[in-house]
Image (cartoon, coloured by chain):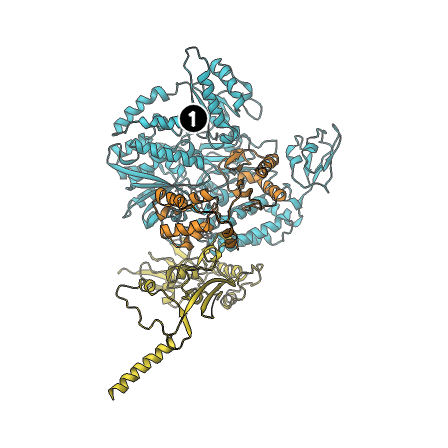
Amino acid sequence: MAGIESKCTEPEIDYNVLNSIIVDRYNQNRENLIMMMQAIQKQYRYLPITALRYLSDKVQVPLIKIFEIATFYASFSLKPKGKNIINICTGTACHLKGTGKMVEHITSKVGIKSGETTPDMLLTMDNVNCVGACAVAPVIVFNEKYYPEADLSVINTLLDQAKSE
Amino acid sequence: MQQLKQAAESNVNTPRITSPKALEDYRASLASKYGHDVPTVIICCGTGCRPSNAVEVAELLEKGLAEADFQGKIVPHVKATGCHGFCSRGPIVELEPQGIFYQKVKPKDVPEIIEKTIKGGELIKHLQYKDASKKVFTHTNEIPFYAKQSRLVLKNIGKINPFDIDDAIATGTYGALAKALSSMTPGQIIEEVKTSFIKGRGGAGFPTGIKWESCASQIGNRYIICNADEGDPGAFMDRSLLEGDPHRILEGMAIAAKAIGSNRGYIYVRLEYPLAIQTLTQAIQQAEAMGLLGDNIMGTGFNFKVSLSMGAGAFVCGESSALMSSLEGKVGRPRPKYIRSVEKGFRDSPSNLNNVETYANIPDIILKGGEWYKSIGTKESTGTKVFSLTGNVHNIGLVEVPMGVPLREIIFDIGGGVPKKRAFKAVQTGGPSGGCIPAQHLDIPVSFESLDQVGSIMGSGGMIVMDENICMVEVARYFTHFLVEESCGQCTPCREGLIRMEEILERITHGEGREEDPDTLEEIGKFVTNFSLCGLGTSAANPVLSTIRHFREEYETHIRHKKCPAGVCKPLYSLKIDEEKCVGCGICKKRCPVNAITGDKKKPHVLEIEKCIKCMECHKNCDFAAVIVL
Amino acid sequence: MKTLKIKIDGKEVTAKPDQTILELATENGIYIPTLCHSPALEPAAMCRLCMVELYEGRRKKFVTACNFPLRRDVEIKTDTPDIRQGRKLIIELLMARCADSPLLQGLAKEYGANVQRFSDLKDDCVMCGLCARVCEKVGGKTLTLSGRGVEIHVNTAFSEASEFCIGCGSCVQICPVNSIVMEDVAGERILKIHGREAARVKLVHCEMCNKHFGPVIDLTKVMSKFDKGAIPPSNANICPDCARIKLAKRIAGRYYDTI
Ligand SMILES: Cc1cc2nc3c(=O)[nH]c(=O)nc-3n(C[C@H](O)[C@H](O)[C@H](O)COP(=O)(O)O)c2cc1C
Ligand code: SF4
Ligand code: FES
Ligand code: FES
Ligand code: FES
C-alpha cells in the first residue's frame, strides 16, 4: 500500500512553515487549497500525510476531499520524490521528435518508469505534457532547467550528474 | 536577470493615473525613452530562448555595452522581451532602429556584435537568417516567416519588455480601456464586440459578443475569467502572449468587466508556465499601483481587481466547468449540469470565460471598431488567428495570419515547407480534440467552418506538420493515450471507451490488428462522441476518426500486410541501406549505438538487421536518403 | 404555473418547468434505464445509460434524462436505434468490470449486449459514484472517487482504513452491484471495499440484552443534521428488539397499573 510506504519516511513537519503557507499566504481560504498544496509540495518535494491532515483541519475541508485533489492533479505526489527530477516532455511536438524513446532509454538504464524514483532517492522521472517550448523540441527539464533539442547523450550526461550527488 | 529587476524597480516611481487624459499625457512623456528610433538591442528572453542561454546573452550585452567606449555616441540600451515566435532560431537579437535580425546568438557572439555591428555598422554573416535556398536576410521584416504574417495580437511581443508597464503604455496599451471607461456605455462595448463577430479563440469558437451579452443580462455578482490553461500539448500561442504582452490581456479583461458589469477577475494559468506566472504577477502589481486596475481605475470610479490562480496539471481543467471547480479549489471534474457558466459558473454566479487570445483581441476592436475587425478574415470567421506551427516544417514558430488564408500558404510560404526534401503527409490541427488533414485539402482556407468540414477543428491554434516518416496510426494512438490519461474518469464512454480504443490501436501498431478493427474503432468512436459528458469526451475520438477517414489504407497496411510504411511501429518494418544511394560517408556507422552497420569509407555500407534496434539514428542522419524502410 | 408541452415517445404530455426528463418519463410510465441515479441525491450523470434524444426544431441532441431540466417545449425519444446501440456499448464496457452483476446481466439481455466483447478488467465496481455521493451527504465523508481517467476508483483517504466512517451502511445499501460489504464481527463493524478493509467502527452494547447492535454514534453530530428542536432519542443505547420489549412492557405496565 502506498500509504504505509510513505508513512515510514514521513519527514519532520514544521508547523510554522505550514502556517506561513496556509494562514499568512493564503488566508485559510479553501478556494486557495490547490495553491496551498503546491506550496507544501514545494517544501517537502511531495505531500506528506501529516501536513495534509493539518491542512484539512486548518481550512475545514474533509481529508477525503484533499486526498481526492492530491490524486486528481498530475503535479501532486503522495510519494517522496528524488533529489533530482528529470522531466521528459511528452507533448505532441516532442513526442514526434522521439521523447518516447528517451523515456524507454531512461527506464532501461536506471530502471525507473515514469513517475517512479530510484531506490537511492537520487532521481525521479516525470512526464509533462508540453512546457511551451515546442519550437525547440525535444525538450527535457532537469531540476527546473530546460534542455532544448535534447538527445540521448544529453540524457546520459544528466543521469550521470544525478548519480554523482 | 539584472535587466528585469531594474525594470521592476524603475516602476516604483511611476505615477498614479487619475484620468484617461492623464494616461495620454503620461504616454506622450514616455516617447523619448521608448520611441521607435531610440537605439535598442532587443534580446528575446522567452521560454523558447532561455534554454539556449538567452538570459546570459542579455547580461553580457548589457555589461559589454556599459564597458565599451562609444566616443560620445548614444549607447543603445538592452531590452529583454518575450517570445518573438521564432524560438527555433533562438536566442534572437534585434538591433533597433535599423531592424537587423540575428539568430541563434550565443554568449560568445556578444563581443563581436558589439564591436562589429553596433559600433562598426557591419553585419555578421553567421548570425543572419538564411532560408532553405541559403538566401541571406538582414532585416526582420524581410524574412518570409515574418513578412507574410499580419501581426495584430502579437504586434508588441518581441518589442516590449513584459516586465515594464511603461513600455506597454508607450505602445498604446490601456488606451482602449480609457476609451471604454470614458466614452462608451457597457451596451456600446458589447455592440462593438458583436459587430466585430470575433469568435472565441479557445477552441469552441462561440461568438464572444453574444457570450458577453448573455452574461451581462444575468443577475448577481459576475466574474471575468481568463482561460490560460493552454492544454493542447504542442501549442504555445497563449504562453507567448502571457509572457510577452501581459498588459494587453489585462486590458482586454478590464474592458470585458466594464461591458459585463463585473469587478472581479481571475486568470487560470497552467503550472507548467512559470515565466508567464512571473510576468502576469508583476503586470498585475504594476497596473494596480498605477491605477489601471484595482479601485477607481483612471479616476472613473470603475473597480476591477484581477487575481492569478494556478492549475496543477490537468488538461480537462481547460473545460469551462472543470476550470471553475478548480478555481474554487476543488477537483477539476466537469460539472454534470445542463447550465451555461454565463448563468451559473464560478461560485455558482454568472461567469464569463474567454481564452487569452480572445481577450488580447479586444483592445484593438474597441480602438479601431468592430467594422474594422470584421474587414479582416472571412465572413464567418473574422480577424486574425495565431497558430503555433511545429513539427516537420522549416520555420517553426508562431504565425499570425488573417482567417481564410489557405493552409498551404501557412505551411509552405511562411513555414518554408517540409525540410530534408521529404514529402508532406498531413497537418494536425486542434490538438487532442482535432484531426489530421491530408495534402489534398491543403488549399482550404483556415476558418472554424472549413476545418470542421474536413474532420478537424480550429482548436486553439496548434498546427503540427507531419512528413512521410510519421505514422498516422501511431499519431492516433498517441492522442488517444494522452486522452486516456487526461480523462477525468467520471463518465463511462470516455473512461472505458477510450481505453478500449487505445487497446485496439496498440495492437494494430504491434502487428496484431484484426480486419474488423477500423470499423470497431469507428463504432466506439462515434459512441464516445455522442455519449460523453463533456467536451473532452465528445471530441476525443476526432484524432482516430479523422485518420481513419483520410488514411484508411495506412490502417489496412498495418493490419493486412503487417507493415508500417512510415517506419515508426517497430515490429512492422525493417531497415536496409540502398547500395546505389550510399556514398560511404560513414555517418550511420558512427551514429549506430549497437554497431549494426559496417563498411569502409567511400564504399556502400551494410546494415545487419539482427543487431538493429530500430532507433532510427542512421535513418535520421543520412543526408543521402540511403537508409530505407522496408 | 406555466407548463410545458412535451412529446415523449410519441405521447403528448405536460411537464413542469425544470422537471427532469427522467421524472417526466417515470410519471408517464416510460422506462429509462439508470445506473448512477438515486432520487435522494443530486444527479451525477456519470453512467450515461439514461441517454435520450432531444429534438428542438430540426436540431437533435443527445442528453441524459436524469439531469436534463426541461425548459422549453421539445420532443424526446427514449428508445431509438442510436440510443439502444449506445446503451448496448455501455453495458458491454461495464460487463468487463462486473460480469457477475445480476443487474447488468438483465440489462445485457434487454439490449442484446455481447457480454464477453471486451477483456475482463477484474474489477467489481461500475463507477457509478453513488457510494461516495451518499457518504458525503449522510455519512462521515469517508469515501471518494480518487485518481482520474482509468485509474479512478472508490477509495478511502490514502487508501487506509478510515477513521471517519460512522458505520451507517448507506454505501452498502445504495451500491447497484453489491460490491461494498459490511460485517459485524466481535463488537466491531467492518466495511470492505474491493475486498479490502476500508473502515472499522465500534458497536454499542445493548443496555438490556448486552448484545452488540449498532455503531457508536456521535449523537450531537447526527442531531446537528436535523432542524432545530430535534430531540435525541432517550433509548439510544438499547437495541431495537429490547426497545420493543421495553415499550410493550411499558404499555402493559400502564394497563396493569389501571386495574
Ligand atoms: C477538454 C477541454 C480543454 C480545453 N482547454 C482549453 C484551453 O486550454 N484553453 C482555452 O482557452 N480553452 C480551452 N477549452 C475551451 C474552453 O472550454 C472554453 O470554450 C473557452 O475557454 C472559452 O473561451 P473563448 O470563447 O474565448 O474561446 C477546452 C475545452 C475542453 C473541452
Ligand atoms: S467526457 Fe471524459 S473528461 Fe468529460 S466528464 Fe466524461 S470522463 Fe470526464
Ligand atoms: S510539446 Fe514539448 S514543449 Fe511543447
Ligand atoms: S522564446 Fe524567443 S523566440 Fe520564442
Ligand atoms: S442515470 Fe443518468 S447518467 Fe447515470
Callout 1: CB less than 8 Å from ligand 4 = no
Residue placed furthest toward the bottom? C259
Q: Residue at x 73, y 42 (%)?
A: B610
- The amino acid type found where label 1 is placed reads Gln
Q: Position of residue B124 (x, y in %)?
A: 53, 18
For residue B630, what is the image quadrant? top right
Q: Tag 1's secondary structure?
A: helix
Residue underneath mark 1 = B2
Residue B309 vs B590, above or below: the answer is below
Residue B91 on image: x %, y %: 50, 27
At a point 52% along the width and 37% down the height, the residue shown is A141
- The foreground one among C38 and B361 is C38
- Occupied quadrant, residue B174: top left
**Which image quadrant is residue C120 in?**
bottom right
- Please indicate whether residue B217 sits to the left or right of residue B163 in the image: left
Is residue C197 visible in the rendered image? The answer is yes
Colour in which chain C is shown? yellow
Closer to the camera in the image, C88 or A63? A63
Residue A157 or B16: which is nearer the viewer? A157
User: Is residue B563 visible in the rendered structure shown here?
Assistant: no
Q: Which chain is orange?
A: A
Quadrant (top left/top right/bottom left/bottom right) for the C terminus of chain A: top right
Would you say B566 lies left or right of C24 here?
right
Q: Colour of chain B?
A: cyan
Q: Residues within 10 Å of mark 1 (few under 14, many from 20)?
A: few
Disc 1 is attached to a residue of which chain? B
Q: Residue A112: where, in percent of width, then height?
A: 59, 45
